[in-house]
Image (cartoon, grey):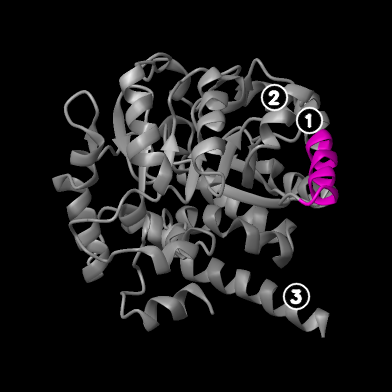
Amino acid sequence: MSVEDQLRKLNLPPNFCLIPFTTLILEPDGKVGSCRHKGCDFPVGNLNDNTISEIWNSDLIQTWRREFLTGNVKICEKEIKYRKCHLCPENNKLLDSVDFSVVQKNPILRLGANFNGQCNLNCIMCIVNKKPNNRYQSAQFWYQLKNDIVPYLEEIDMLSGEPFIQHDTYRLIEMVSAENPKCKWIFTTNGHWFLDQEKINYFDKIIIKNMIISIDGITETTYAKIRRGGTLEIVKNNIQNLLKYNESRKISGKNTIDFRLNFLTQQDNWKEVDSFIDYANSVGIKPFVTYLYEPTNLSLSSLPQEKRIAIIEYYIKNLSWSYLKLMMRILGPLLDTIETKKESYLKQIFAKKLTFSLDRK
C-alpha cells in the first residue's frame, strides 16, 4: 500500500507528515529540532531552557502537529511541495505506532542524536562543524537517555558533524545495543574515513537501516572545492570497502545496509549531476539529488535569471528522462523562479518522459 493510500485509510490529509509525532533531534548547542529537512535553524525547544519531556510537547511542535492534522500546512509548505519528504516510505513505516494527537502521551520513537559539531571536513555550505563538541557530557544526561528515551526508540538518526569520528557515537552504540538491540540506525556521513576493524566491531552490534553518504562533487576539483579538506578518492575507496562489508553482513545473517549517495546541488556542482548519477549506478547505490537553498549565496536560486534559464535548458537538452526524473527536486524550485517560462519547460520535460516510455515499449 502506498503512503498516499495509508493516509487516506487513516483519514489524514494528503500533506500529512508524521515526523513531529515521532521525532526529536538534539543539536550540538542544545537546540532541539524535529525534522532533518528543516534543519537546526528550526528548533522546537532548547535543552538549556527546558527538559526533553517539556520540549516534546512545546508550543511550537504542537503547532506543527496541528498543521499536519488539519492539512493547513505553513511551516513545511516548501518541503512538502518540492521534497515530498512526507511521503518517504521508510519514515512512514512508523505510521501504525503514532498517536495522532496534538499533545503527545506516547514516548519519542525517533531520535536524532547530533551530539557534536566535530567534523573532519570544512564544507563551504555547512555551519554544523562550527558548533560545540561537549554539550552532552554530563552523567545525568546519559542516565536520563538510558532510562527515559533509549528503551522506547524505534530508530536513531545520526547526522552530527561527522558521526564516525566522534566518541559519543560509539558510546551511544554501546548503550543502545545493550538496552534496545532492536532499534534501527540511520547514519548520514561524508564517508571520508577508513573502515577499520574497530568500526566493523561496532557496526556488527546494531541494525543499520540506512547509511547516506554525501559527496557533492564527482570530480576531484569540485569535491575539494565544496568539501574542503577532503579527497574524493578516499571516499570512493571507503564506499567499496563498505559494500564489501555489507556482503559479509548478509553472509553472517545480519541485516544488510541500504546505502544512499547524496548530492547537494549548488552553484559549483550543478553540471556534474548526471556524472554523479552515473557513478552511483556504477557502484549499485541509489542516487539522491537534492537542492541547496541556504546559504543563499551558494544556491542556484540566487543566480541571475538568464543563468537559471540556461541551467534548466542545459538539463532539458542534454539529459534523458531517466536523469530528469531523479532531478525534480532541482528542477522544481528552479522552475518556480522563472514563472513566465515554467509551463513551456514542463511541456518539454513531459515530452522527454513520453519519449522514454514509448522507447521502452
Q: Amino acid type of disc 2?
A: His
Separation (CA) of disc 2 from disc 1: 7 Å
Mark 2 and 3 residues: CB-CB less than 8 Å, in contact? no
Question: How many numbered marks appear?
Answer: 3
Q: Height in image: 281 above or below 346?
A: above
Q: Amino acid type of disc 3?
A: Phe
Q: Height in image: 231 above or below 31?
A: above
Name the residue at 53% across, 64% down: 89
The crowding category of the residue bearing disc 2, from other C-alpha atoms within 10 Å (few below 14, some 14 to 19, many at least 20), is many
Most common secondary structure along the magenta stretch:
helix
Residue 177 visible in image = yes
Q: Which mark is residue 238?
A: 1
Q: Point out the stretch of residues depicted in magenta.
A: 240-253
What residue is pinned by disc 3?
356
Q: Which mark is residue 192?
A: 2
Dot 2 falls on a residue whose secondary structure is loop
Residue 123 in magenta stretch = no
Residue 261 in percent (x, y) is at 68, 44
Q: Height in image: 126 above or below 137?
A: below
**Quadrant housing residue 201:** top right
Name the residue at 39% across, 64% down: 97
Mark 2 and 1 residues: CB-CB less than 8 Å, in contact? yes
Residue 248 in magenta stretch = yes
Q: Nearer the viewer, residue 228 or 134?
A: 134
Separation (CA) of disc 2 from disc 3: 37 Å
Residue 146 in percent (x, y) is at 40, 33
Separation (CA) of disc 3 from disc 1: 35 Å
Q: Amino acid type of disc 1?
A: Asn
Residue 130 in percent (x, y) is at 43, 16
Q: Nearer the viewer, residue 80 or 157?
A: 157
